[in-house]
Amino acid sequence: MLHHFFFWLVHDVTPFVTGVAQRHHVWILPIAFLIAFSESFVGVSFIIPGTFMLITLGGVIGASHISIFPAWAGAVAGSVFGDWISFWIGYHYHHQILHIWPFRRFEDQIEKGLHFFHNWGTWAIFVGRFLGPFRATVPLVAGMSELEFWPFQIANAASAVVWAYALLAPIGAVMRHYIT
């Protein structure tokens, strides 16, 4: 069942999203926002291939000679917002989260995220954004660990700026080079 869902996302939804972005440039910012949000929001990130979709969007941008700025701004905002909500959920529910559906299904990932966060501290938020399994769980466990809001948000925003550019720009540059 889950295999069919992933197949549908990659083979039907991704071409649709990239087609809309290519034909309607004004939709690039909200598309990038939604993709990055889904990749950063705990729970949703386990089922949406957001990294793949953002890299693909970067290719569309490069091949279409569209400015990267709207996609980058949307991806930064979406990832910051997704992480902030995950942080808030962890901060509000603390360790009770392990007993709430759907989080109890991901107890192992949350425990690994807690261990990672306790070893790296605030740096785990920055580094975790670039490590798929920790991308959405580290903000949750930072909230569970009662990290103060501003250190979290500074690491969240700084990592989002770099992460969004790293996903969108390289393939976009390659596509722009080869299409020209």
Image (cartoon, rainbow, N blue to C red):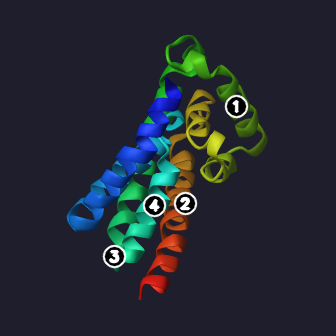
Between the C-alphas of marks 4 and 3, the distance is 12 Å
Residue highlighted by disc 2: 163
- Disc 3 residue type? Ser
User: Which residue is label 1 attached to?
Assistant: 114
Q: Secondary structure at mark 2?
A: helix
The correct choice, above or below, for 3 with respect to 126 in the image is above
Gap between marks 2 and 4 measured at Cα: 15 Å
Q: Secondary structure at mark 1?
A: helix
First-in-chain label (3 vs 2) = 3
Helix, strand or loop under label 4: helix
Hey, what amino acid is under mark 2? Trp
Number of labels in the image equals 4
Which residue is denoted by mark 3 in the rendering? Answer: 64
Q: Residues within 10 Å of mark 4 (few under 14, many from 20)?
A: many
Q: Residues within 10 Å of mark 2 (few under 14, many from 20)?
A: some
Labels 3 and 1: the sequence-earlier one: 3
Query: Badge 1: few (under 14), some or many (20 or more) residues near its Cα, within 10 Å?
Result: many
Kind of residue at disc 1: Leu
For this rendering, which residue is in front, 81 or 168? 168
Given contact means CB atoms under 8 Å apart, are the residues at marks 2 and 4 in contact?
A: no
Is residue 25 visible in this depiction of the protein?
yes
Provide the residue designation for mark 4. 56
Question: Between tags 2 and 4, which lies in front?
Answer: 4
